Amino acid sequence: MTSTALQGNIQVGTEGIKHNLRKFKVHQAIAEYIWNGFDAGATQIDIEFTTFDETGVIRQLKISDDGSGIKQDELKQKFEPFLESNKKEHSPTARNTGSLIKGKNGVGRLTFFHFSENAIWETVYRSKQGNKKYQINVDASNLKHYVATQESNTKSQTGTTVTFSNIYNLEAGFKLIHDYILKEFSWFIKLHECRNYKITINGEELKFDNIIKLEDSKLLTVGEYEFNTRIVIWKRQLNKEYSKFYYSTDDGSLKLRETTSFNNKGDGFHHSIFISSSYFNNFVYEKKKENKELDELFTNHSPTFLDLKGQLNTLIADKRREFIAERTNILVDSYEQEGVFPKVNTSNKLDSIRHDQLRNIVGGLYQVEPALFNSLSIPQKKTLVRLLDVVQVGQGVDDLFEIIKEVIDLNEKQKKELAELLKVTTMSSIIKTIKVIKDRYHAIEVLEQLVFNENRKANEVDHVQKFIEQHYWIFGEQYNLVTAAEPSFVEGLKRFRYILDGFKNPPKEAEIDHEHMYKEPDIFMIRQDFVEGKRKCILVELKHPKKPLGDKEFSQVKKYLKVVTATDQFNGDDIIWEFHLVGNRFTRDNDEIPNAIESTKQYGKKNLAVVSHAHNYEVYVQKWSDIKVELEHRLRFLQEQLELQRESLVPPANEDADELVENSQNSASRPKEMEFAEKTN
């Protein structure tokens, strides 16, 4: 088995493959090979690794499965069309039906470059002439190229073993990978418990019981059918698998999976419901209820199925009620320990009753809306509880000021302003405002990490620009995001006119005749209401944190300005324009930008570089440091009053730029770019 049978090249180069797979972490990459085994029909995955005895660092890793193997005559289809898939998981119906294929053809097999320099597949498959075996070899230095050996006859069972050598990035040993596998495959192993699916690590079967908080079984009956139901409540959220129903035949074949109605409640109630019955032996999933010759008893629109769903929802609601009740006691007790509740005179009976009632109110509110209590700082908790206390005893505004004074120091003017605010603002609005302030501070911290911390490895398009698209409030409040990233001035003008027409008239073909008409500004915003009788538009050009601002970048913004001033539809007495060029620093060998800013000092506007009152436009060149200072100034007063703990908002050091941008979406995020095509069709 040493001579070469065939060689092939994947349709994307090595760097392109690595770029497409760059977001995989080591533990995610290893999980891909486990999924590949289950995708091939395996019931058991064996993970074996050896370590350097003196350090515990992994030196070699093997992942084996008892699946169907890889047929050699299918290598070209399976290895060469990178990022294409013939697997059913990616069809619309498969997401709702029983298909559980997870690995993407052309992706999972190449993620090994994150932790190994070489991968060798030893595979056995069944042919008409009997079982065949051969090897496939891929090096991380040349991912686009694979080499397969001649196949030979074998009496071995079908399956595949992937051996990874020259290991790196596994200095921490296998603990992180072990924990990730638990969260990744727990629901899947539970689903196939009747078929004895398992994962072993160095010969020891992986046990998933330690991440199960509660498991309960119940027999449900609908008409003549019985449904064996198991509900599993997990101690922590699983990896990218929402809480779901899994409907299987009596022999364990999955026919349908769908999310439950208790997802994203902010309560930590992570659950899976496994239902098996002979009812599903003839079950057919229909996206829409159709009139065709199909027994209506065995579809997801049938009365039997809908009755079952009703019983299941009642079962989950009961379990969630028990779960939340336990969590409520934990939360209220923690508030006591943190000193969140007002001090109580235990010798005063009325004081004690009032305190107990306040505990009940907090607990009741938590059971109604658990998400309200997530991620609150101690001052925010105190503010919320004091406000609830005021509500329960019916105190006046003066007493409210005394209670809030523990958290917010108010002068007489501020008391008057707050009194006016309370006339028109509900308690929920106050709480929402506190959350927005907190989230905006978090956004500022994320921005600082993206543009100043080189260890985050942020780039212009994927991170800085994407973040600004989510948080364009940084450049002004109450704007519509007209375009972001790709659309040119031609497309931008269509959307621009559509907004100015009040979203009433379908846009006509944009009439632009300019050499720079297809330039693509990073951010294009428009304020719909009037500012001093004029509509305000903002164009923003963002530059990579490492790229200094000089003539070339300044010229790029001037080109945008020329397109605008040369296009009648972009102009009018009621329209004013701002152009922003943003980067970390100016080039050292050019004085054009500093001189331009110096020449406009008489207007008293910081970072103003070009101004034309005749054409209603201004050009600003800003450093990220200036923007950060300005943002902090805008929020400083509220930050001081609410005593937010800024340190708790700094993103974790182990988050990369992709994770920073993804996790920065919160109440501070603004609506996405207008969905133009949908609104105008």
Image: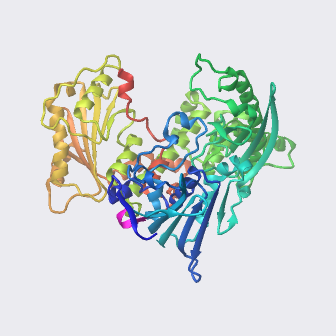
Residue 681, given in percent of the width and then of the height, sits at 36, 20
- Nearer-the-camera pick, 301 or 348: 301
x then y, percent, for residue 214: 77, 49
> Residue 178: image x %, image y %?
62, 63
Q: Is residue 502 left or right of residue 177?
A: left
Please tell me which residue lies in front, 343 or 472.
472
Residue at 16% across / 28% down in the picture? 512
Residue closest to the eye, 246 or 603: 246
Give the farthest residue toward the front: 129
Residue at the location (79% across, 43% down)? 355
**Magenta stretch: residue 140 in it?**
yes
- Which of the 4 image quadrants contains residue 578? top left
Q: How is the image coloured?
A: rainbow
- Does residue 471 show up? no
Residue 200 appears in the picture as rendered = yes
Number of residue marks: 0
Instruction: Indicate whether residue 431 is drawn in magenta.
Output: no
State the extent of the magenta-drawn residues as a range: 137-143
The vertical placement of 224 against 371, above or below, is above
Q: Position of residue 368 (x, y in %)?
A: 70, 35
> Residue lying farthest bottom?
54
Q: Is residue 650 left or right of residue 400?
A: left
